[in-house]
Each structure stands twice: as C-alpha cells, then as structure tokens.
Image: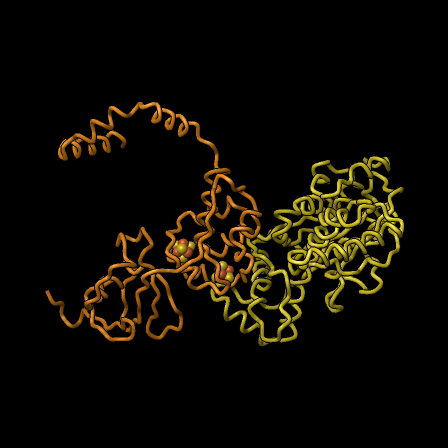
Chain colours: A yellow, B orange
C-alpha cells in the first residue's frame, strides 16, 4: 500500500523520532508513506466560529495537494491522506467535515485559491492507528521479534483522536484501539482513568502551571494503575507529559519520572528495528534504563 | 518631443487622470505627469527593490503589485507610489544564534500566524514562492527557506499584503544569514583569501590601483575582464 502522507511541522522538527519510527515500522508491514511533495502547516486548531472560513484555507490547500499528487501516480491509496500527529489529524479531518456540511463554503474556498485546481471534497483524512487496525493487528503480531511481555503500558489517547465524536477514530469514552495495538505488540496495556483526559494542550505556552497540574494527575494516575511507561500519538501531549516532568519534579520532589514514548517507537522496538529508527534519545525522560531492566534492549 | 495621441494611454495616479506615453513604466509615467520622486525609487533596473508599488488594471478586481521601474502602464490603470514600508525588524547578534526552529520562534513569532493563504506568493514581483519559504521556516528548515528566498529583493510587497502581518523578507534575510554562517558548506579558499588579505598580500597592488588615473584603470579593468573569459 502506497498512501499519501502528511507529516506536519512538528514531525519535521522536535518529533523527528516519531516520524522515523512510524515510517520504518510501517514499511515492515508493507505500508509505504509517500510524503506530499508540497504541504503547509495544517493551522493546528480548527476554527470554531461559523464565519471563519480563512482558517480552513490551510487544511484545504493540503487536500488539494493530495489530488495533485494522485495525478503523478506515486500512490495507490488515492483518496486518503495519512497523518501521524493527532492535532494535524483533528484539524484536517474537521475541515473535510465542515466542507461536507456547508457546501457553499467550499465554493468560497475554491474561488479564493485562484491558481490551484478546485477541491472536490473527495479526500478522507485518516490516522495511522486506523490504518493499522484496518491492516489487521494480527499482521503486527507476525512482525514482533522482541517480546515486550513484561512491560505494562498506559495507552494515552488524549482528546484529538477521539473528539468531537464525528471525527473520532474510536469510542470517545471507552476507546480500545491503542490497547489492541499494544496487545498485538505483546505488551500489557493497563486500564486507567486518565487515558482520555486533556493534557492542557496549548496552555503549555503561557500557563505552565495548569499544564503541570494536569500532567501530574495523568502521570501519577498511570503509575498508580501500574504502568511502567506511557504511549501517545501526539507531539503536543508528548511535550506536556514528557518534557513538563521537569517542572512537575520541582513542585513534587517525591514524584518519580516515567518515560513517555510514541506508539511507533514501541513498534520499532518490538520489530527490532535499528536503534536510530527507535530514536530513544529524542525523548526527554530517558526510557533506556527501564527497557534494559526489563531485558528488552 | 510630444508623442502622437494614438500612442498615449490614460492612467489614474492617486485618483487623478493623466495622459502618458503607452510605453511608460509606472515611474516614468509619474515623472511624465510632473511628480518628482525622491524616495521609493532606486536603481531603475529592477534590482534594488526600492520602487515596489501597487496598482489596479481596468476591469480587473485584483490589486496587483510590482516594481514601478519594471511595470509598464496599461490604459485605465490606477496606480500609486509607496515611499516607504514600515516593518518590524528584530535586532539580533548573528554570532549568538543557533540555526534552529527556536531562533525562528523567538525572533519571528508572527510566522506561526500564517494561514497559508498564499497572498504573499501572488504579490511577489520576483515570482518567489513566498508562502513556501515561510512554511519551511515554520518547520525549522532554514536551508530550504534560504534557498527559496534567494532572489528576494526585499521590496516589501509580500508583507504589505499578508493578513497575518508577517514580515516575510526580514525572516528570509535571517534564514540566509543563518545558512551562510552555520549551514553552508565551508569553503577553505575563502578562508585562505581572508588570511592573505589580512597578511597584506594585496596591499601593494591596491595602493597602486588607488593612485592610477582613470584611463589606465579602465584599460586594466577591461583587460582583466577579457582575461577572465
Ligand atoms: S519575497 Fe517579498 S520582499 Fe522579497 S521580492 Fe518577493 S514580495 Fe518582495
Ligand atoms: S500572506 Fe501571510 S498568511 Fe498568507 S501565506 Fe503568505 S505569510 Fe502566510
């Protein structure tokens, strides 16, 4: 399967290890990401105001790029756009829905674009986790070369994969997709309360106080529920839960740090891919000692 | 010499009608009409970027931009001349910067307001993919931004049209400076030449040149050109 791929800005800067581990693990499953030759920032947040069409320009421009790319014959899964970052997934997908609901807005957007070809509303935005589910978790099982048996993992869904309901990749209250992935990787997913609790998102920029409070609650809930580490699919969640442990530790000296990994890094570990692909030096809290103590690395 | 009536077109300079020769550029049309330009005009060869301006053509809703020294007037054109572009410019010490996304975030936070409308690209008289270099900076790809923006003449039209009020050309200048200082392939020849200059290798020759009369200097110059070819 060759599928059009939208990386998003963070995956090209601070979350390079997310991108590398995803591309290589996907390859092991016979899924090839073909990056859009040209793409722009998705805009990061979906405009909620009824009359704000301007902020749909960025998502729609990327969807037009998919149509352009299809003409080149570089992909065979033509009507879908694959995303990794939960924020990008959410923003792009919500724009596709807005256009479906308000066809007039699409006319305004197409008129504004000027030189680009018209967008026809045909592209479906998907998250890598959905592709993994569709491909079959059994396929993942077959690729596991390193057992993660002793590893108890808290799957952190956050908000962006699940809400609002009409774009969510799983049940917003009782999601299982991450759990299924972890099980197929031979790890043990734990049940916990904070799996879909908000990490504080953008408040991390100007209200570290709130973000570290939310982070403390999420991380300690994971630990109390028996987790050795946390996995996520969102660079912003990862930043808030991983990097912000520095502030949390200052405020709560008794707090014990816990590694936060991208789910694709865990796939790379289980598939026994190169160390470079795992990119474990990209995480703020070093996961290597834990993985070594469990006999995985 | 007055040109004949057939070769004249009517343009509207800041709202008032003037008849000007049809081959005029915006600058010569204004001067023909009696305006004296003291600022917002420079090399008159399309290189310096000082004369960037905006205009509208008859029957077209688009507000267009171009260099006034390069844009030929059309009948019914409405035009103006922009003497100066006020733009935000951060002050930095290049030696203290790192060529990464954090530098961009700190010095040009407005870049992250870009809505990908592509208005800047449409405005650029140099046909630069302005939006693309802004997007490259957003991803922290300084080399790509430096490369795309290479032909920028800092005319300011992109910034004038940007709904996110980004000053693209100042960001692009930073990208090229960072690229040149930190990312470009090092060239040992340049370093060697700098050492030679410091050591005074060319001092004598330079002194001779400064004392030369114009004729000899000119002869020497053209001889050098020929030699190079
Ligand atoms: S990038 Fe902007 S400043 Fe540079 S030439 Fe184009 S319009 Fe002018
Ligand atoms: S005009 Fe401004 S907002 Fe629009 S694409 Fe260019 S930089 Fe972005």
Q: Is residue B46 above or below residue B62?
A: above
- Horizontal side of residue A38 vs A215, given as left or right: left
- Horizontal side of residue A50 vs B3, given as left or right: right
Residue drawn at point x = 85 percent, y = 54 percent: A221
Q: Is residue B3 above or below residue B147?
A: below
Q: How many marks?
A: 0
Please name whichever residue, A35 or B132, is drawn nearer the observer in this view of the structure.
B132
For the C terminus of chain A, the image quarter is top right
Q: Residue B145 in the image: x percent, y percent? A: 49, 48
Residue drawn at point x = 53 percent, y = 73 percent: A108
Please name whichever residue, B3 or B158, is drawn nearer the observer in this view of the structure.
B158
Please name whichever residue, A111 or B139, is drawn nearer the observer in this view of the structure.
B139
Q: Residue B131 in the image: x percent, y percent? A: 49, 57
Q: Residue B1 in the image: x percent, y percent? A: 10, 64
Q: Residue A176 in the image: x percent, y percent? A: 84, 58
Judged from this view, the residue extending furthest toward the left is: B1
- Horizontal side of residue A207 vs B204, given as left or right: right
Q: Is residue B23 visible?
A: no
């Amino acid at each position: 399967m060759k599928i059009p791929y939208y990386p998003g800005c963070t995956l090209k800067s601070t979350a390079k290890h997310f991108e590398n581990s995803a591309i290589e693990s996907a390859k092991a499953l016979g899924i090839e990401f073909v990056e859009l030759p040209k793409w722009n920032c998705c805009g990061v947040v979906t405009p909620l105001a009824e009359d704000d069409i301007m902020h749909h320009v960025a998502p729609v421009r990327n969807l037009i790029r998919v149509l352009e790319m299809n003409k080149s014959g570089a992909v065979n899964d033509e009507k879908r756009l694959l995303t990794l970052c939960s924020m990008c997934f959410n923003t792009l997908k919500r724009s596709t829905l807005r256009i479906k609901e308000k066809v007039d807005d699409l006319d305004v957007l197409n008129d504004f674009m000027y030189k680009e070809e018209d967008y026809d509303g045909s592209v479906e935005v998907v998250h890598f986790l959905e592709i993994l589910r569709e491909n079959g978790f059994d396929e993942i099982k077959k690729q596991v070369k390193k057992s993660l048996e002793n590893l108890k993992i808290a799957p952190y869904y956050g908000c962006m994969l699940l809400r609002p309901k009409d774009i969510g990749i799983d049940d917003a209250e009782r999601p299982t997709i991450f759990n299924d992935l972890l099980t197929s990787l031979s790890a043990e997913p734990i049940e916990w309360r904070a799996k879909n609790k908000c990490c504080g998102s953008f408040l991390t920029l100007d209200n570290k106080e709130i973000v570290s409070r939310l982070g403390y609650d999420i991380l300690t809930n994971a630990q109390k529920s028996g987790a050795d580490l946390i996995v996520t699919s969102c660079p912003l969640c990862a930043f808030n839960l991983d990097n912000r442990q520095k502030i949390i530790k200052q405020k709560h000296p008794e707090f014990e740090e816990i590694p936060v990994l991208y789910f694709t890094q865990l796939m790379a570990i289980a598939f026994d891919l190169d160390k470079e692909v795992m990119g474990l030096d990209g995480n703020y809290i070093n996961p290597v000692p834990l993985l070594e103590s469990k006999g995985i690395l | 010499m007055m040109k004949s009536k057939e070769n004249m077109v009517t343009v509207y300079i800041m709202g008032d009608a003037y008849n000007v020769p049809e081959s005029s550029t915006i600058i010569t049309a204004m001067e023909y009409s009696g305006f004296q330009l003291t600022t917002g005009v420079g090399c008159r060869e399309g290189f310096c970027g000082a004369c960037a301006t905006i205009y509208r053509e008859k029957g077209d809703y688009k507000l267009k931009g171009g260099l006034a020294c390069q844009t030929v007037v059309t009948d019914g054109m409405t035009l103006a001349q922009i003497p100066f572009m006020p733009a935000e410019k951060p002050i930095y010490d290049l030696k203290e910067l790192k060529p990464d996304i954090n530098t961009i975030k700190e010095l040009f936070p407005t870049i992250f307001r870009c809505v990908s409308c592509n208005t800047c690209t449409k405005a650029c008289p140099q046909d630069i993919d302005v939006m693309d270099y802004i997007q490259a900076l957003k991803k922290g790809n300084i080399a790509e931004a430096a490369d795309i923006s290479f032909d920028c003449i800092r005319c300011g039209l992109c910034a004038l049209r940007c709904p996110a009020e980004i000053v693209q050309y100042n960001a692009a200048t930073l990208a090229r400076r960072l690229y040149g200082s930190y990312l470009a392939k090092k060239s040992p020849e340049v370093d060697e030449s700098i050492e030679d200059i410091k050591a005074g290798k060319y001092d004598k020759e330079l002194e001779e040149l400064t004392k030369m009369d114009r004729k000899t200097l000119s002869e020497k110059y053209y001889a050098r050109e020929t030699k190079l070819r």
